[in-house]
Structure formats: C-alpha cells, structure tokens
Image (cartoon, coloured by chain):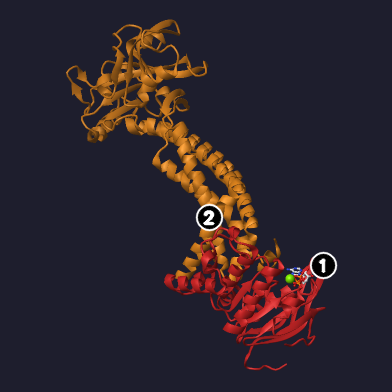
Amino acid sequence: MSDAPESLVQVRNLHKVFRRGSERIDVLQGVNLDLAQGEYLSLMGPSGSGKTTLLNLIGGLDTPSDGSVTVSGDRIDKMSGGKLSRWRSRHIGFVFQLYNLLPVLTAERNVDLPLLLSPLSRAQRKKHVATALAMVGLSDRAKHYPRQLSGGQEQRVGIARAIVTDPTLLLCDEPTGDLDRRSGDEILELLQALNKEHGKAIIMVTHDARAAERASRTLYLDKGMLVNEGVDA
Amino acid sequence: MFRWFAQTLAVTGLSIRSLPQRAGPSLVAVVGITGVVVTFVAVLSIAEGFNAAMANAGSADTAIVMRGGSNAELNSALELDSTRIIEDAPGVRRGDSGPMASAELFVIVNVPKKSTGTDANVPLRGIQAAAFDVRQEVQLVEGRRFAAGTNEIIVGRSASNQFAGLELGQTQRWGENAWTVVGIFEADGTISESEIWCDAAVLQPAYRRGSTFQSVMARLDSPETFQAFKDALTTDPRLDVQVERETDYYSSQSSMVRGIITGIGTVIAVLMGIGAVFGAVNTMYNAVATRTREIATLRALGFGGSSVVVSVLVESAFLAALGGVIGGALAYAAFHGYQTATMNFQTFSQVAFAFTVTPMLLVQGAMYALAMGLVGGLFPAVRAARLPIVTALREL
Ligand SMILES: Nc1ncnc2c1ncn2[C@@H]1O[C@H](COP(=O)(O)OP(=O)(O)OP(=O)(O)O)[C@@H](O)[C@H]1O
Ligand SMILES: [Mg+2]
C-alpha cells in the first residue's frame, strides 16, 4: 500500500464493531483501501458483509472503532459533530438506493438543499441547480414533485443533488438496486459519464456484477476484509 | 451564523410543509392545548370579572366607617350617636339636605337563583336618603325609589337578573315582613348592583337592630380630604372606628375570592397543562419518528443537529400556538360577558359579575400554550438531533 500523493481516499486498518446488547459484531476487521483521484470503484460482497458500513465510514456518516480514514488530506476519523457535518457538505455527495428525496419539495428545491449549506448567493445557487439538472437530463422536470417522477427520474434527481455542490467524492449505495434494468442502465451511464467526462471520483456499492463492470476497479468485501479479485479494467 | 439561520429556516420550513401529512396526530396536540387554554382563560376570566366588579366598586372620594377592628361591614356595629358624630366630621361634603353621609346596615336574605332554583344569600341593605348622594353612580332604570318608612325595596340590576322574584312589582317575604320591589337600579356595574336596598329606619326594627347601624358611607369634599377626615375620627375619644376609602375596602374584600379563583384556575390549568404537554410530547415523537429518514437524509447532506432541534421545537410551538389562538378565541366567544354570581366569602353574600376575557388573559393563554409546546417539543427535538444517521438511513 503506497501513500501516493494523488490518492484521494486512504483507508488504513479500519475496524468497525457494532454491539447489539451483549452481542458483538465485527463488521470490518482491518480494511485497507486506496482510491485515486478520478477513480471509479465498485464494491461488491454478500449481504451483511459491511459494504454500507464501509461507505458510511468513508463518507463521515459514522466513526470507526479503530483505524484511520483520510479523504483529500482530511483525517475524518478524528472529526465529529458539527465539524464532520460541514465537512460532509463540502466533500461528499451521497446517492441512496431509495433516492431519499424530500417529498414536499420540487426536484429543483431538492437539488438546491445542499447548496443552502454553502455561501453561494441565491442567483448562484439557481445556476448550479440548473446545471446539475441539465447534467442528469431533467431540466424539463425541475418543477415536478418526486411523486410525479419515475423511479429512474427520482434517482437522477438524487444524483443531481449529490453533484450540485461539486463534491470531492460521490458515494453511491446500490443506486440501481430499486430500479428496473432499463432505468438502472441509464443511471449507470450517467455515473460513468460523470466519472469519464467530469473526472468525479466514485465509490459504488452494488450487488449487480454487470453494474460493477462499469467501474474502473472492483473490490470484494468478505468476512470483514477487502479481497481484490483482480478484475481491474 | 447567517448560514446557520438559513439552514435552520430551510429545515423548519420542511417540517412545517410536511405537517399536512401528519395532520391527525398534529390535530391531537392542537386540540389538547386548545382545551387547556380554553379552561385556563375561562377560569381566570372569572377572577378578572370578579376583580373588575370589585375594583369598580367604590370611588376615591367616598369613605366607609366601621367599628374599629371589624374589617367587614358584617362584623361591625355603630350606635346612632357615633353615626351622628361621623356625619358631622370635617371633610364630609354637604349638600342642600345636609351632610352626604348615609348610616347603613345590612342583613342577608335568601333568594332563589333563577338558574338553579336554589337559595342564595343576597345582601338587603338599609340606607338613608343621603345614600343616593354618596353613590352618585346609582341610577333608577325602572320604577322609583322606595318611600321612606315603608317596606318597599329597590333592587340592583344584577340581583334582579340573577334571582327570582326580584322584578318590578313582585313581593318577597323575608323574616316577618313582606317587601315589594318598586324600582330597579343600575350602578355602573359596581357591587351595589348585586344588592337590595331599603329604608334603614324600616330595616332596623324588622331585624331587631334597635338604633344601631353597621357602617357610615360618607362622600368627602375631595379624595384629598380623606386623611383629614380619617384623622379627625380616629383621634376622637368618643369613637372607636376604622376609616377606609371605599375603593380600598372593596379591593381588600375581594382579595380572598380573587386569590381562591386564581389559585384554583392555576391548579386546573397546570394539571391539564401537564396532560397536554404529554400529548404534545407524544405528537412530536410521532412526528420525529415519521420524519426519521428525512431528518437522517438532511443530516447526511450536512445539515446540523441544532437546526433539526430548532425545527422540531418550532413545529411544536407552532402547533401549540395554533391551539393557543383557537383556545383563546373559543374562550372569548363562549365565556366573555357571561353573567354569573359568586359568593364573596368575606361578606357571605353574592356578588354578580361577568366573565371577563381581557387581552392580557389572551396573551397569557397564548404564552402558556407556547410554553407547553416548547416543553413538549424538547425531548423529541433532542431525540431527532441525536438520531444516529446510519441507523436512521437503514429504516424504511
Ligand atoms: N448500527 C448498527 N448496529 C448494529 N449492527 C449493525 C449496524 N449497522 C450494521 N450492522 C450490522 O453490520 C453488518 C453489516 O451491515 P451493512 O449494512 O454494512 O452490510 P451490507 O454489506 O451493506 O449489506 P447489504 O448488502 O444487505 O446492504 C450487518 O450484520 C448489520 O446487521
Ligand atoms: Mg448495504
């Protein structure tokens, strides 16, 4: 493992233990991971192997039991509370399996949400939102509410919301898990385009080998450890 | 700081906008708080009304003289000689027919209430002709004054409204005498309107009071002459009297009742308030539970925990304020001006008054509602902010 200066994410000896009553679950047991700038990594593994847990630790949604997580030079395992929240809003774009759009807001207002945490003016925000919606091909659905959109469209709004702040890293947890094949493929095309044309670094958790193939590299999580099955593209 | 504000505003806006989806449970909280505020305002409006009736009572340039240490007219007794000395004291205003001072006595008679038919105590006051000069607010609105030396009575407007058989021309038997109503009077809503008046000279023998009175009501030259008048009487070796301004007398008379009503009202409001707070707590826990994924999503996007706390508190306060406003409006519509009477325990007689929903009470009711909302929202708000993001995101 090299601490190459261009590596965007460095995970070192990462452990995560959950306790449920007296039961102790060692989900991650010494995970090491490096992600280069502009890399597109897919993460596979059986259900319950800790993929979501690893993603959450890299995204600063949770804190590790042991080990370190460095993202673009920040030791986020050392951060907590408000500082971590602010860090997330600047560096991470999350794409959720179930989209997690706010039903009371239109597509554009959903996309605008993360910008409320930025120092941008209203006019600047409007421009960013329009750009993000254009990138996911939904400019004509800006005023629609989530319930007026198809699943694939909802996920595209979710992606627009994730990229509107121009984050360092896009974290996608089974982004196509709830979509039919056609819509799923559209989402995968979109992520690929974001990676290829805009240089976005992406980590995507997926159960679908076909989806994983789109990434530049695939890692497998098993029994708390990452195994490299060498399907490098 | 400004960004925190914008962020909090956005989160709060979201919670308010999603309220319609939680209409049912939200309504429960609103109704609970409405109930408390209605009760709170209604009960305290009794105290206010009573207060107003008593505060209205008396004027600053009128003094009431009773036997020393008697504190209330009921316990007082003054001999004829004493009343003469009092009437001639310095500071008493003089009219065409002599000093404006009325030696008075009163007894309690039983009259059935119109509403329930049960007997209530009503003061029957024997007055002298000067009483009309002393209490200038008294105006006959029906009939005429009683004729001196007869068993005729005049009845205050509230007493006439509240009690049966006190209308013009009706006759009542109290003790060994029959009394006929020949007039109805108003007195600017003051306590006199709760009384029945007759000729003191008739009342004395009817109740075997000999030549004693209980008080002298005296109209003074001006409010400022009160001290001189009081000093003259209290230093007079022939007299043992206490002298009070009429206004002070009535307000001290009402203090106990006012205290009791306010006390009871507060206890009821607090007890009900505790119930309503639990209702609000429940509603807000519910709201937080329903919005778990939404809150977790916002937190994942980087929104701060404090913004979430504020949004839950604001939503709770908003619901409570709604309850407060509705409650205040209902209390006003249902109770304001409602006429009733209560026992003044210090005189053991009925005082008629109207529920009075003052603007101050409405403000207090709204504040109380707001307080219930904030207290009720506190724990749910903290729970919302402490929500572990990752577990919350797992929930569907
Ligand atoms: N907050 C938590 N408390 C207790 N146990 C947890 C918690 N989060 C995850 N786990 C447990 O950790 C293990 C890994 O969970 P994780 O969600 O990371 O798996 P996953 O690989 O994403 O699975 P899936 O493919 O089903 O999404 C599971 O056994 C899960 O029950
Ligand atoms: Mg998972």
Which element is circle 1 on? Answer: loop
Q: Is residue B318 above or below residue B236?
A: below
Left or right of residue A161, residue B159 in this image = left
Question: At which x and y percent is residue B118?
Answer: 52, 16
Q: Is mark 2 within 8 Å of ligand 1?
A: no
The residue identified by callout 2 is B16
Question: At which x and y percent is residue B269?
Answer: 54, 41
Which element is circle 2 on? Answer: helix
C-alpha gap between disc 1 and disc 2? 40 Å
Question: Which chain letter goes with mark 2?
Answer: B
Question: At which x and y percent is residue A92?
Answer: 60, 77
Report which colour depicts chain B.
orange
The residue identified by callout 1 is A22
Q: Is residue A226 above or below residue B308?
A: below
Report which colour depicts chain A.
red
Q: Is residue B274 above or below residue A212?
A: above
Q: Quadrant of the C terminus of chain B?
A: bottom right
Amino acid type, mark 2: Ile
Quadrant of picture, ligand 2: bottom right
Is residue A45 visible in the rendered structure shown here?
A: yes
